Image: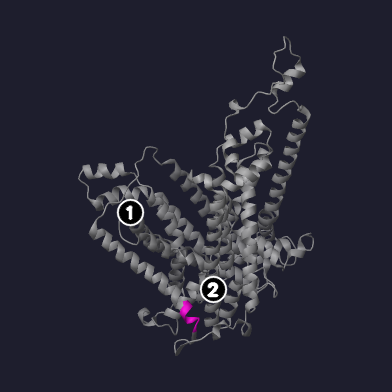
């Protein structure tokens, strides 16, 4: 964005030249002349009115087109899933009979109980470990704090399957650490909880780091004045001020675990969970109607947790003090050293688990022949689609990053900036936040039921790479939309007011102001879409065809076939590709900011 553009738009409308069409004042003025004086840009009234009308038309087209896109990719698949749960597999309306039949199935209560208590246990352990880690990174003067924070975020680049495969190599039947289990098995609750804690750890850490980053120094000064030590200040000041962040992170981790499919599928053994029940109903028994029933049951705890999280976020924002003094951590050698050791142990555990799967992918035959080779990377000789599945994942991730970042920016713009079409924009905002409460398995099953219908004109997308891109964009759309919305809402309303007074159409302001200013957020969202599209399993496990098998699905296929080492190799390829893609997008972001964001440093 040029400097002249950025300096001319924010000027006040009072400073604009008056549209006077002569130098001498006439003694009388007719109404037509007064109307011309009220126009903001010169003597041509008719073109101005026509331009305004065309602006409204095009704006309406964009709003309703975006609303149609979200209806087709989010609302209708979820609605079809709900409706299909009341219809039997032979096409007859069954009401609640399928819910009753599923409730009477042996083991259903066990699946529900396991899903709830394993998710609750995983969330509690994960949040407790992450809170101490975040406290060490954000509230102490320990060395290498930024390095430890970066290491803790590395699991975001790996699919949850990689953690589960690593645990098999460590604690499985031939695991190098299986003796630590003292005869117990890793295939079951132990593996599910440990694997879930490992892959959800960075999600909890990001929330808790944000919570602990903002502290009011006045509270700690008052506590010290009253004679409170560090431990009492922590218990009576730090913990109470962190309660919302702790509850939000617990809910986020709970939802991630209860809706996760990868970890219980790989290392869950015979432990029944709702997520694996859906997979068995759809893939094992080809019973889509019963799968829809289980998916709706899985949506209930996710929806309740989502509503609770939204409520807690609103409460958290309302309790932020306006006059708070930023807290600056003070050195305290014993505490700094203790938390340095703690963070080092946790970071080492994360890297060791990830490194085990990476190392095992290069081993000839674990654990008997540890000679390094590339035998496990010969994917064309194994189940899962070979190297073509990796190429499909790469293509799908790139397309998802491009389409997702642009669509989420457009949806956020249409919600935040226009003034007309209020009701349509409210619906747009509501539908854009639906995917946050819908598990990936439920959304994927909804896509099957909606796009596979012969009466759907979009039926041709079923089985193609396009439907995988659409489902991935829809699955991760809410976070991207909210991120872009936050970036757009930082721009003052004065831009639109001045543009209106100058007769500048909205698409010019969008192209020359909103898009350049929000470019860093767009690139961040593109990286988010790319990484998640490479690593996702649940949203796409029902949608691929033999020609569009993905790398994450290939990991499942190879693991099911007993090829654990090749599965680790493919998961390693996903991890490396996600990291490389994130670095490339970051480099592109830096280059674009140097080219377009000079005004930020003035």
Q: Label 2: how many residues lie within 10 Å, few (<14), some (14-19) or many (20+)?
A: many
Residue 215: horizontal and vertical position, in percent?
Answer: 35, 47
Q: Which one is nearer the viewer's eye here, 376 or 82?
A: 376
Q: Kindly tell me whether residue 100 is visible in this rendering.
A: no
Residue 429: horizontal and vertical position, in percent?
Answer: 61, 46
Q: Where is mark 2, residue-wise? A: 265
Q: Which residues are magenta?
A: 357-362
Question: What residue is shown at x 62% (from left), y 82% (from top)?
Answer: 383
**Residue extending farthest top:** 27
Counting residues from the start of the chain, the first of labels 2 and 1 encountered is 1
Secondary structure mostly seen in magenta is helix
Q: Where is mark 1, residue-wise? A: 139
Residue 568: horizontal and vertical position, in percent?
Answer: 52, 78
Tell me where residue 88 sits by quadrant.
bottom right
Residue 514 in magenta stretch: no
As drawn, is 339 to the left or to the right of 447? Answer: left
Q: How has the structure been colored for display?
A: one colour
């Amino acid at each position: 964005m040029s400097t002249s553009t950025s300096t001319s738009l924010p000027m006040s409308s009072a400073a604009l030249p008056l549209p006077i069409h002569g130098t001498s004042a006439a003694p009388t003025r007719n109404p037509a002349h007064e109307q011309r004086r009220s126009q903001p840009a010169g003597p041509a009234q008719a073109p101005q009115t026509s331009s305004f009308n065309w602006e409204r038309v095009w704006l309406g087209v964009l709003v309703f087109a975006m609303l149609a896109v979200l209806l087709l990719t989010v609302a209708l698949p979820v609605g079809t899933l709900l409706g299909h749960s009341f219809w039997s597999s032979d096409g007859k309306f069954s009401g609640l009979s399928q819910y009753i039949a599923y409730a009477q199935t042996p083991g259903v209560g066990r699946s529900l109980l396991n899903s709830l208590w394993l998710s609750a246990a995983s969330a509690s352990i994960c949040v407790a470990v992450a809170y101490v880690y975040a406290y060490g990174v954000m509230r102490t003067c320990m060395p290498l704090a930024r390095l430890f924070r970066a290491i803790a975020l590395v699991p975001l680049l790996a699919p949850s399957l990689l953690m589960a495969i690593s645990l098999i190599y460590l604690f499985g039947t031939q695991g190098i650490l299986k003796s630590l289990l003292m005869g117990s098995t890793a295939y079951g609750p132990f593996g599910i909880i440990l694997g879930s804690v490992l892959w959800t750890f960075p999600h909890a850490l990001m929330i808790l780091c944000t919570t602990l980053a903002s502290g009011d120094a006045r509270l700690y000064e008052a506590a010290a004045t009253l004679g409170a030590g560090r431990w009492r200040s922590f218990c009576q000041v730090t913990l109470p001020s962190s309660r919302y962040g702790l509850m939000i992170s617990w809910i986020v981790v709970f939802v991630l675990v209860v809706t996760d499919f990868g970890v219980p599928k790989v290392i869950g053994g015979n432990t029944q969970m709702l997520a694996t029940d859906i997979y068995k109903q759809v893939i094992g028994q080809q019973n889509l109607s019963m799968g829809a029933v289980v998916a709706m049951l899985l949506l209930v705890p996710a929806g309740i947790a989502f509503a609770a999280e939204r409520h807690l976020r609103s409460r958290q924002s309302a309790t932020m003090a306006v006059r708070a003094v930023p807290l600056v951590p003070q050195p305290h050698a014993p505490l700094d050293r203790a938390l340095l050791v703690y963070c080092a142990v946790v970071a080492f555990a994360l890297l060791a688990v990830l490194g085990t799967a990476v190392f095992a992918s290069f081993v000839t035959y674990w654990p008997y022949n540890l000679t390094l080779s590339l035998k496990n990377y010969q994917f064309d000789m194994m189940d899962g689609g070979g190297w073509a599945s990796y190429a499909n994942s790469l293509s799908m991730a790139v397309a998802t990053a491009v389409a997702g970042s642009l669509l989420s920016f457009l949806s956020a713009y249409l919600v935040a900036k226009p003034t007309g079409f209020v009701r349509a924009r409210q619906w747009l905002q509501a539908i854009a936040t639906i995917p946050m409460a819908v598990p990936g398995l439920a959304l994927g099953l909804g896509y099957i039921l909606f796009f596979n219908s012969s009466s759907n004109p979009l039926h041709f997308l079923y089985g193609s790479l396009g439907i995988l891109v659409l489902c991935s964009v829809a699955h991760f759309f809410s976070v991207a939309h909210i991120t872009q919305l936050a970036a757009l809402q930082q721009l003052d309303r004065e831009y639109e007011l001045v543009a209106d007074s100058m007769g500048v159409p909205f698409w010019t302001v969008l192209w020359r102001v909103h898009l350049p200013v929000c470019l860093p957020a767009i690139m961040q969202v593109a990286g988010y879409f790319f990484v998640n599209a490479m690593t996702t399993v649940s949203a796409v496990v029902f949608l691929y065809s033999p020609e569009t098998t993905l790398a994450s699905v290939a990991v499942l296929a190879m693991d099911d076939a007993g090829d654990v080492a090749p599965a680790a190799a493919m998961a390693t390829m996903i991890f490396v590709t996600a990291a490389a893609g994130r670095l490339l997008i970051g480099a592109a972001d830096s280059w674009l900011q140097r080219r377009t964001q000079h005004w930020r440093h003035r």
